[in-house]
Amino acid sequence: MGETVSNEKAPKKSFVKGLKVEFKKIIWPDKATLTKQTGAVLAVSVALGALIAVLDLVIKFGLNIIIG
């Protein structure tokens, strides 16, 4: 029918070693970049929150007029 696949797990040592290798590949941002990106995320989050709040109020007002 087909080839059987071995379900043997890799030893823990190779997993941890591989994890260390992958962590060494990460390029961490410097403080200035991190600050700029954090500020951008906060600004967009606040702006979208305000937009959603305004839309919610408009929809509520419209429904109150329609319903009565």
Image (spheres, helix red, strand yellow):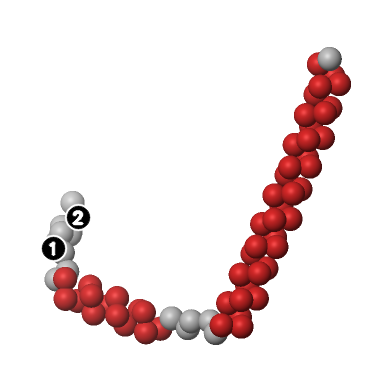
In the image, 13 versus 4, the foreground residue is: 13
Report the disc number at residue 39: none
Residue that sits furthest to the right in the current view: 65
Expressed as whole percent of the image width and height from the top left, the position of residue 34 reads 58, 77
Q: Residues within 10 Å of mark 1 (few under 14, many from 20)?
A: few
Q: Amino acid at mark 1?
A: Glu
Residue at the spot 61% in from the left edge and 83% down from the top edge: 32
Q: In this rendering, would 62 be left or right of 53?
A: right
Look at the picture and state if 52 lies above or below 35: above
Q: Position of residue 5 (x, y in %)?
A: 17, 59
Q: Amino acid at mark 2?
A: Gly
Q: Which residue is mark 1?
A: 8
Give the left or right position of residue 21, taking residue 1 as reference.
right
Residue at image coords 82%, 28%? 61
Quadrant hosting residue 43: bottom right
User: Which residue is under mark 2?
Assistant: 2
Report x, y in % for residue 13: 16, 76
Residue depicted at x 36% and y 79% = 23
